[in-house]
């Protein structure tokens, strides 16, 4: 996950409280040093004895301790508040802030209304809390009224209130209102700018975010991080990289938030070299390696195909939190190392770390990718019972996948029937995939139609059903699925593969010719295929006949994106170097077969990350044992 930039403006002060009478000073001074409720209560009784129990000045201080300080007691504060005959703005501000701290946002808004009804004039310390309450509460209508009061009472110059208003409008997707507040501010601080940038990016308007970023007169690391995070969260990793380079050129310090965002970008692109660079930088610069950042690094290594490094970081941690265990187990699962993943899970249990939902998903995936049916059944029971984890949709999906791949279609179907919830497209999709692998046309057809109705915009679902029909030569049905897809305007995602060389990531689209060295690359593909033909490669034209594989139909099999990326890798790396590729879709059968032969004929290790797992091709074999 990319780092979230902290946007909440720091809590505003409550405003000054002046002491007018010298004889009270002693009492108040002692109050400041109070650290428990029982001490506080002594002072409270002292105040009563001094006859100050209806003195807002004195009571306000007692109230502040109870309502806001970490040693306080909000209930005591509320009782106190109810007995104050004429509370002033300071007292209201205090009690509203106390309620805000406990997230009682509705009460905050009610207190504010009460304040107005009792003709207590709000001051600039009132608004930030009330606006924030409206924001958390998602009460945009009340929020707009408060905004009107801010303007009417002349507090439109106060940054605290304005920043909170921007935050509130952004939160409710009122981006024009947020912008108006921003534009009218006489003075904007970094929080104002960053709130707007993150606001745009949160709703997917990354280009607008970028325009604001470029307008900033002065940027600090928070604003750079916000913009980098914006690109990463919308998967525009290349742009994140160029911004990151610009940031470094301007000598802005790389902190842990930017590091986390950039690691996520490396993970997205499969850019191992860049990821390693950031990892080294984190080590050198003394950025604190907390569990969260460590997990991001482990995740990067796992997803960039470098398990050894991931394990090195994992085992070097002084404290392995649940998230790093989950990440490491998930990484092993993704690489088809089921046994190792289960071994690590046992270690985790020995260390008395209790697993959660995610652990169970990863353990079951480990079993599914390695065909460990017995173990999968065992862990499903064991984990749900021992740790009282209620199995969720996802867990049933993993089990159906595990059983289905192993050909236990009846058991998979029985599990679906017995699930406490009705299966979603993910669970049924797993069964459909299994029907395709094991050639169960009748069940596959039933399930396939249901899946398509559950997810009518997901092209992969149509393709799987069409392939199922194609595998038994039902071409009319293949054509019907195609027509249905076209009628509903469902587009297939184009196949796209990425390869990183010398820190530069190149993208290849199936059949695409936009690369400056396209001609050379296509020649290399032809040469590559010629070489493996003599080693027994026969194109798997099944896919071409169906004309409906995951890759675009107009692109011949030979120029699928991973073939282009492999050719580019062969052209640009020295003999023996590992070629690492990441792909957005599942690897097709033909590319899988070709990659195995290329690894043998060209004596290269090829690591491909596809949509769901890793393939390590070496010496003519794949680590997935053709089980994917
Ligand atoms: Zn392919
Ligand atoms: Zn494979």
Image: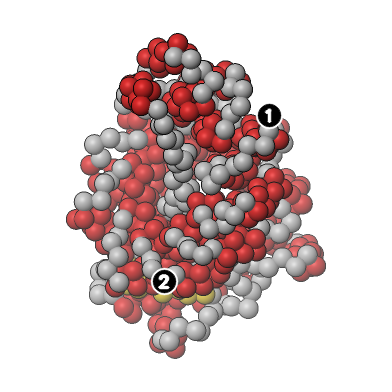
Quarter of the view holding residue 403: top right
Q: Position of residue 13 (x, y in %)?
A: 45, 41
In the drawing, does residue 110 fall left or right of residue 343?
Answer: right
User: How crowded is the residue under tag 2: few (<14 C-alpha within 10 Å), some, or many (20+)?
Assistant: few
In the image, is 322 to the left or to the right of 87?
A: left
Disc 1 versus disc 2: nearer the observer: 2
Q: Residues within 10 Å of mark 1 (few under 14, many from 20)?
A: few
Helix, strand or loop at label 1? It is: loop
State the residue in front, 210 or 160.
160
Q: Which residue is mark 1?
A: 420
Q: Which mark is residue 179?
A: none
- Element class at badge 2: loop
The answer to whether mark 1 and mark 2 are in CB contact below 8 A is no
Query: What residue is rendered at 56% in x and 36% in y?
Result: 89
Residue name at image x 39 percent, y 47 percent: 331
Marks 1 and 2, how far apart at CA? 57 Å
Mark 1 vs 2, N-terminal side: 2
Q: Residue at x 30, y 60 (%)?
A: 254
The residue depicted at 33 percent of the width and 22 percent of the height is 26
Residue 466 image point, x, y percent: 70, 61
Badge 2 residue CB within 8 Å of ligand 1: no
Residue 490 can be seen, yes or no: yes
Apparent side of residue 281 relative to residue 10 in the rendered image (left or right)? left
Q: Which residue is mark 2?
A: 217
Q: Is residue 572 above or below residue 262?
A: below
* Residue 62 locus on image (x, y percent): 45, 23
Number of callouts: 2
As drawn, the residue found furthest toward the bottom would be 519
Q: Position of residue 529 (x, y in %)?
A: 44, 77
């Amino acid at each position: 996950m990319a780092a979230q930039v902290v946007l909440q403006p720091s809590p505003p002060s409550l405003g000054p409280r002046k002491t007018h009478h010298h004889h009270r000073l002693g009492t108040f001074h002692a109050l400041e040093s109070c650290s428990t409720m029982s001490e506080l209560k002594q002072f409270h009784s002292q105040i009563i004895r001094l006859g100050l129990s209806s003195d807002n000045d004195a009571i306000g201080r007692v109230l502040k301790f109870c309502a806001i300080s970490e040693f306080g007691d909000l209930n005591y504060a509320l009782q106190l508040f109810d007995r104050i005959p004429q509370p002033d703005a300071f007292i209201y501000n205090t009690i509203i802030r106390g309620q805000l701290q406990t997230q009682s946002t509705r009460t905050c808004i009610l207190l504010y209304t009460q304040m107005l009804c009792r003709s207590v004039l709000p001051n600039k310390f009132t608004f930030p809390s009330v606006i924030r309450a409206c924001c958390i509460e998602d009460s945009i209508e009340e929020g707009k009224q408060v905004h009107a009061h801010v303007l009417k009472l002349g507090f439109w110059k106060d940054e605290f209130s304005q920043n909170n208003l921007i935050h509130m409008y952004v939160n409710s997707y009122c981006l024009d209102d947020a912008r108006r507040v921003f534009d009218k501010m006489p003075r904007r601080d970094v929080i104002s700018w960053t709130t707007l940038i993150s606001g745009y990016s949160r709703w997917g308007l990354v280009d607008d975010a970028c325009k604001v970023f470029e307008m900033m007169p002065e940027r600090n690391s928070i604003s750079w991080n916000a913009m980098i995070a914006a690109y990463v969260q919308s998967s525009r990793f290349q742009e994140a990289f160029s911004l990151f380079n610009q940031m470094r050129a301007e000598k802005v310090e790389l902190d842990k938030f930017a590091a986390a965002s950039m690691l996520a970008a490396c993970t997205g692109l499969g850019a191992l070299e860049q990821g390693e660079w950031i990892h080294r930088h984190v080590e050198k610069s003394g950025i604190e390696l907390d569990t969260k950042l460590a997990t991001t690094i482990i995740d990067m290594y796992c997803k960039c195909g470098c398990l050894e490094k991931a394990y090195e970081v994992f085992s070097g941690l002084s404290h392995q939190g649940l998230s790093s265990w989950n990440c490491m187990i998930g990484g092993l699962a993704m690489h088809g190392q089921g046994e190792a993943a289960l071994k690590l899970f046992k270690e985790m249990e020995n260390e008395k770390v209790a697993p959660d939902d995610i652990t169970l998903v990863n353990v079951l995936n480990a079993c599914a990718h390695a065909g460990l049916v017995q173990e999968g059944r065992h862990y499903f029971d064991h984990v749900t019972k021992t740790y009282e984890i209620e199995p969720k949709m996802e867990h049933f999906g993993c089990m159906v996948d595990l059983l289905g791949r192993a050909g236990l279609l009846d058991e998979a179907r029985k599990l679906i029937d017995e699930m406490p919830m009705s299966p979603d497209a993910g669970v049924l999709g797993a069964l459909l995939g299994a029907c395709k692998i094991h050639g169960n046309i009748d069940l596959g057809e039933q399930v396939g139609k249901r899946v398509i109705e559950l997810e009518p915009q997901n092209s992969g679902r149509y393709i799987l059903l069409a392939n199922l029909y194609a595998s038994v030569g039902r071409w009319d049905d293949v054509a019907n699925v195609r027509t249905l897809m076209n009628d509903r305007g469902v587009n297939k995602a184009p196949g796209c593969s990425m390869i990183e060389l010398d820190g530069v990531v190149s993208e290849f689209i199936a059949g695409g010719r936009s690369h400056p060295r396209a001609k050379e690359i296509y020649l290399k593909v032809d040469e590559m295929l010629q070489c493996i033909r003599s080693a027994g490669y026969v194109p798997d034209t099944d896919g071409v006949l169906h004309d409906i594989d995951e890759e675009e139909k107009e692109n011949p099999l030979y120029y699928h994106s991973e073939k282009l990326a492999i050719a580019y890798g062969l052209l640009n790396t020295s003999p023996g170097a590992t070629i690492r590729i990441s792909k957005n879709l599942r690897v097709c059968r033909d590319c899988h077969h070709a990659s195995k032969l290329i690894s043998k004929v060209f004596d290269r290790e090829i690591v491909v990350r596809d949509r769901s797992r890793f393939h390590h091709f070496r010496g003519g074999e794949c680590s997935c044992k053709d089980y994917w």
